[in-house]
Amino acid sequence: MIPTSASAPHSKPSGAPLHTIDLIRKKRDGGTLDGREIGFLVSGAADGSIPLEQLAAWLMAAWLRGLILDETRALTLATRDSGEKFSPARLGKTAVDKHSTGGVGDKTSFLVAPLAAACGVAVPMISGRALGHTGGTLDKLEAIPGFRTALTLDEFEAVLMKCGASIVSQTPTLVPADRVLYALRDRTGTVESPGLICASILGKKLAAGLDALVLDVKTGSGAFLRKPEDSEYLAALLVSTAETAGTRAVALLTDMSQPLGHAAGNWIELAESVDLLRGKRAPQSEDLRELSLILAGWMIHLGGQAATPELGYARAEAALSDGSALGTFFAMIEAQGGDTRAFSDPNFHKPGATQVVPAWESGFISTMDTTALGWAVQRTGAGREKAGEPVDPHAGIDFHARRGARIEKGQPIATIYATTPALLAEPAAILEQAIHISRTPPQEVPLVSRIFTREIAEAHLRKAVSR
């Protein structure tokens, strides 16, 4: 339900001292926090003056009660302003980024960043780590020997100047509030909140000084928000909030009813992405290729390098075909300390244990519980259960059959790569429960179901709030 109440129990006179427990109670009881109160909480998260247990309690209250539009916008801007910010002005290019709300096997960043940069757009990408059942862009990149994600802002700018794209983590002083709140949400079951998701995503992205942002909002069984109406609301909320803050934005509602591409893990996702950048086209990677070109097309369009998203798509496809995107990606890796020779070494990928999972019956793959599949990937050692835990760069799952595919009993359906043999059994059991085989093929699901521009987003929010 979309929160609309503007009631404010426990209200205090403007300028009165603020106390965290009062704000927890206020939100718990259905009240609305104003910008000063939200700024107080965000500052307390950033400088450590509010204990984690109180921040966790407020997050749960916000998750249960929801955040109205004004609260979400205030939380977004306070998060953005909680530390230093990056300015892309000296790059001499339009700064455009892409963000996905998270999915299983979602590796589009490794394609769209070099595709857009090869077409003249600056791509300053501040990314995150694994959250819940989804993988983290930074964890995947750190599977490359030597690759550094923790750059200073000066180093970030230098890589952008040289390569046109850079993918980094938050610095200790860049949006520090989100660093704390992001980790807490993962550990307190408060991830699936449109307002909290919006503020976390845009807090980081707006701190990068973006001129424009393309948002990939997932829907389906692998999305954080599984109901289409919830994903639509989040897409509209993200676009409207970004535009209000002065950043052009568009959101695409995309399918996550199965893993994107065939690989889900860390190194194996990078290997699949580089195969596509090298011009290799596997049937199991076609959805990844197509979505990456669509997203890059919008980035190139919003970056002023194509008159329409369709022409942007054509430019991106040309950069894929002529190898310039691959060259950009490898240049970025090397500029951040990574060793690209690993991508040509057939012996580099050395998982601790491997198991091929055969199909348990014949038929068509009809549905996939993609969230469960994400947890199966996490349980191989590719993800983490606690913030700060190491991940295994070589763990993950390679899916050999897609939704709608006809398979025969005994045919390989997936290969599991785990840290140890003891970690193979649970993912294999999850696969058998999460993948459903039927006698008839399922209906096709569009890769992109809706596109939210500013006008569409604001109309959608007005309709949602009036219900």
Image (cartoon, rainbow, N blue to C red):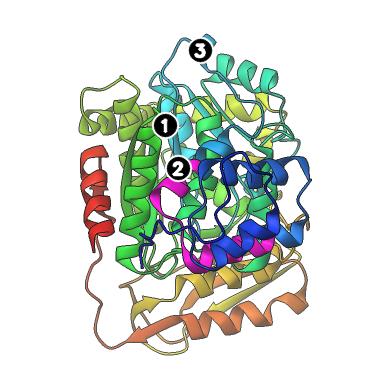
Which residue bears the numbered disc 1? 245
Q: Where is residue 305 in the image (x, y as percent from the top left)?
A: 31, 19
Q: What residue type is labelled 1?
A: Ala
The image's mark for residue 73 is 2
Q: Is 58 included in the stretch rendered in magenta?
A: yes
Residue lying at 25% horizontally and 44% vertically, measured from the top left = 458
The part of the image, by quadrant, that contains residue 78 is: top right
Magenta-drawn segment: 56-74
Relative horizontal placement of residue 261, taking residue 129 as reference (left or right): left
Could you tell which of marks 1 and 3 lies nearer the N-terminus? 3
Give the tally of numbered discs.
3
Which residue bears the numbered disc 3? 89
Q: Look at discs 2 and 3 and give the one toward the viewer.
A: 2
Element type where label 2 sits in the image: helix
Q: What residue type is labelled 2?
A: Arg
The image's mark for residue 296 is none
Residue lying at 55% horizontally and 60% vertically, measured from the top left = 264
